Amino acid sequence: MNSPLTFIKRYWPSALTLAVVLYATLCSDPLGADELPAIPNIDKLIHAVMMGGLFGAIVFDTQRAHPDRRLSRRFLMITAAAIMIFGAADEVAQTMMGAGRSGDFLDLAADWTGVAVGYFTAPYAVRRVLKLKD
């Protein structure tokens, strides 16, 4: 049986990534309006990177915890679906909170794009980073 401390040690990158995503998406002005570069739709790129990064962190932590086996396609699909649902819930939460944020379908599309990119790239990249055999 795994203790909570073992779980935290094993999955801290995923927990930290989730905390950053929640802070960035639910706080009223996490960076300040003037701190984002004046690049059109940069926020969409940030959404994609955050959700793809969350997917990658979960893949990294899980693969590191089980280096002797490849992650199954089922695990990857369930993880991707869970993060996509989280992205939708996050957009709804932004609208419901009324703290100067609003849900946006294009943000959700960017979230899902980030997850899709992570789905196709993270498993391979993580195995390379951990130096595991293919």
Image: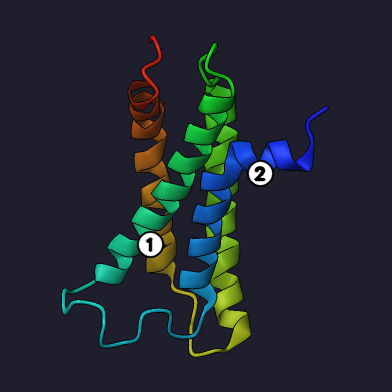
Q: Earlier in the sequence, mark 2 or mark 1?
A: 2
Is residue 73 rendered to the left or right of residue 110? right
Say which residue appears at 56% left-offset and 30% top-offset: 62
Task: Note whether 48 is above or below 11 in the view shown.
Answer: below
What residue is shown with label 2? 8
Say which residue appears at 44% left-offset and 53% top-offset: 51
The colour scheme of the drawn protein is: rainbow
Q: CA distance from mark 2 to mark 1?
A: 25 Å
Tag 2, which secondary structure? helix
In this view, the residue in front, 45 or 65, is 65
Q: Please state the horizontal and vertical placement of residue 43, each as a whole percent of the image.
A: 31, 70
Say which residue appears at 53% left-offset and 21% top-offset: 71
Going by the picture, which residue comes out furthest to the left? 39
Looking at the figure, which quarter contains the N terminus?
Answer: top right
Residue type, numbered disc 1: His
Say which residue appears at 52% left-offset and 26% top-offset: 64
Q: Please state the horizontal and vertical placement of residue 66, each as a whole percent of the image.
A: 58, 20
Task: Note whether 96 is above or below 127 in the view shown.
Answer: below
Q: Please state the horizontal and vertical placement of residue 33, each as a whole percent of the image.
A: 31, 87
Whether residues under marks 2 and 1 lie with C-beta atoms below 8 angstroms apart, the answer is no
Tag 1, which secondary structure? helix
Is residue 122 rendered to the left or right of residue 64? left
State the image quarter where residue 34 is shown: bottom left
Task: Note whether 103 is above or below 32 in the view shown.
Answer: above
What residue is shown with label 1? 47
Looking at the figure, which quarter contains the C terminus?
Answer: top left
State the image quarter where residue 3 is shown: top right
Tag count: 2
Residue type, numbered disc 2: Ile
